[in-house]
Image: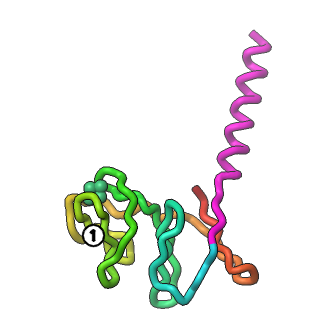
Amino acid sequence: MLAVGILWDKLLKTENQLAIQKQVSLPFNPNKTISFQDDFIVVNKDGQTKVFSSHCTHLGCNINKTEGDKLICPCHGSAFNTDGNAIKGPAVRPLDSKSFSIDKATSQITVEV
Ligand code: FES
């Protein structure tokens, strides 16, 4: 029973370490208003940067295009504004906002996954 406890404790520590290490670094261009990178949408507007998951909150399709400053899902036409809010259905929930940090020296943005 002690061995099971030790293994369980080791497994939990490994999962915690993996959770900490889940980050993605992407190129950062502050002059581009909307960019699609991997599974993320980076929005630079009014001096602020926001990062969203590119997965539509309707059924999870990858949002990959814009119409003006709207983010458009190619599957069923949901639209989101640059704050990530659904402005046209069928999606009703906002895009998932991501925590991130910017390293201006290297022009990289690191997103917490
Ligand atoms: S998955 Fe995006 S609108 Fe349906």
Q: Position of residue 13 (x, y in %)?
A: 74, 36
Residue drawn where x is 78% and y is 21% of the image: 6
Give the quarter of the figure containing the C terminus.
Answer: bottom right
Figure quadrant, ligand 1? bottom left
In the displayed structure image, the side of residue 56 where residue 91 appears, left or right: left
Q: Magenta: predominant secondary structure element?
A: helix
Q: How is the structure coloured here?
A: rainbow
Q: Position of residue 72 (x, y in %)?
A: 31, 70
Location of residue 99 with respect to 83 vertically, above or below: above
Residue lying furthest top: 1
In the displayed structure image, the side of residue 69 where residue 39 appears, left or right: right
Location of residue 20 with respect to 92 vertically, above or below: above
Residue drawn where x is 69% and y is 42% of the image: 16
Q: Which residues are magenta?
A: 1-26
Pointer 1 residue = 79
Residue drawn where x is 67% and y is 75% of the image: 108
The kind of residue tagged 1 is Ala
Res 112 quadrant in image: bottom right
